[in-house]
Image: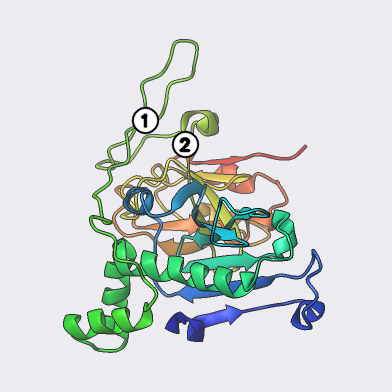
């Protein structure tokens, strides 16, 4: 069993399932939290490409999905009378961001229309889910991040940290060449009849005003989790070095490549939507008025009216 079990935050199983009854609502949930950061699109793409020959890999927004498939048989001989087989699977969801959460759910076998002859389904699915997590941590760029974390947090040498990672991931399969250097493709040129895409090199501040059509000209990028627990959507953000930050906020939208962090919006906001946050590396300013309380906005547009470089646009629901 994976030693990562000790880091599991939350598990749940319906009480009826514990007694051996498997209703449709009974399931197990495994959640593992890892203190490492993953929000660079190139790093996410590296994981997808590095593991695509081992698992069925998919991505949606800031989430990576790794699925392991296996076949159950009611007897070993496919040519025998009464032979049956069923395709089963378990998926681990990697939620990226400031910390990484690895989540999996184990549903009742009836969800797959599997007959009663299937044995030990939950035990196998739980084992395979942990195997996915261990394999990702041992082979992909996540291993480098875990080793770096162990070296800093537990004052280990690199050799000790590597040994510790091996100890934590006993179910890992060894996958060769699972750390490809993936490059995110630059925005494609505008197609006739379509709006032009916004491209930036991150070497200089961008002149205002904010382009109010940014959602049509920028690709969605990783969501940022604020300290207040709100998910702040971003568009056009490139990597994690803050050189090209794009536009942050769905309703209180700030183009952080234009923003010069004068603080006028913080002073003007009557409901404390903004708070200064450090973003070293940006050409316009190394701190930004982050919309930590975006859901509290009352759409008074005070911040929009006082912004000197015109980097803010309020999208009122009315």
Location of residue 283 in the rendering, given as x and y in whole percent from the top left corner: 29, 48
Which corner quadrant of the image does residue 170 belong to? bottom left
Q: Are marks 2 and 1 in contact (CB under 8 Å)?
A: yes
Disc 2 versus disc 1: distance between alpha carbons?
8 Å
Location of residue 316 in the rendering, given as x and y in whole percent from the top left corner: 71, 40
User: Is residue 99 something one can see in this rendering?
Assistant: no
Query: Which residue corresponds to the image point at 37% horizontal and 81% vertical from the top-left?
Result: 168
Closer to the camera, 315 or 148?
Answer: 148
Badge 2 density bin: few <14, some 14–19, many ≥20, Cα 10 Å? some
Badge 1 density bin: few <14, some 14–19, many ≥20, Cα 10 Å? some
SS at mark 1 in the image: loop
Query: Which residue corresponds to the image point at 48% horizontal and 72% vertical from the top-left?
Result: 130
Q: Which mark is residue 187?
A: 1
**On the picture, is 209 further left or further right than 89?**
left
Location of mark 2 (residue): 219
Image position of 104 with respect to 291: above or below: below
Image position of 70 with respect to 254: above or below: below
Which corner quadrant of the image does residue 191 belong to? top left
Location of residue 68 in the rendering, given as x and y in whole percent from the top left corner: 49, 58
């Amino acid at each position: 069993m994976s030693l990562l079990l000790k880091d599991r935050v939350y598990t749940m199983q319906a009480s009826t399932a514990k007694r051996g009854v498997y209703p449709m609502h009974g399931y197990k949930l495994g959640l593992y939290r890892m203190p490492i950061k993953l929000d660079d699109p190139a790093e996410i793409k590296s994981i997808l490409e590095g593991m695509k020959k081992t698992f069925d890999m998919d991505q949606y927004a800031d989430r990576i999905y790794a699925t392991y498939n296996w076949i159950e048989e009611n007897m070993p001989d496919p040519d025998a009378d009464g032979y049956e087989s069923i395709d089963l699977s378990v998926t681990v969801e990697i939620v990226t961001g400031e910390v990484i959460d690895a989540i999996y759910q184990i549903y009742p076998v009836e969800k797959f229309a599997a007959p009663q002859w299937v044995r030990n389904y939950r035990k196998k699915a739980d084992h395979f889910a942990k195997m996915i997590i261990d394999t990702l941590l041992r082979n992909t760029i996540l291993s480098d991040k875990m080793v770096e974390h162990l070296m800093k947090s537990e004052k280990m040498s690199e050799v000790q940290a590597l040994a510790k990672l091996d100890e934590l991931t006993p179910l890992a399969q060894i996958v060769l060449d699972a750390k490809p250097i993936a490059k995110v493709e630059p925005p494609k040129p505008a197609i006739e009849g379509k709006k032009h895409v916004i491209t930036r090199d991150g070497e200089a501040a961008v002149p205002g005003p904010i382009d109010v059509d940014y959602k049509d000209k920028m690709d969605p990028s990783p969501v940022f989790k604020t300290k207040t627990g709100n998910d702040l959507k971003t568009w056009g953000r490139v990597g994690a070095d803050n050189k090209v930050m794009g536009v942050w906020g769905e309703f209180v939208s700030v183009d952080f490549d234009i923003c010069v962090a004068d603080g006028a919006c913080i002073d003007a906001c009557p409901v404390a939507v903004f708070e200064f946050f450090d973003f070293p590396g940006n050409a316009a300013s190394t701190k930004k008025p982050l919309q930590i309380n975006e859901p509290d906005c009352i759409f008074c547009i005070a911040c929009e009216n006082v912004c000197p470089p015109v980097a803010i646009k309020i999208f009122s629901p009315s």
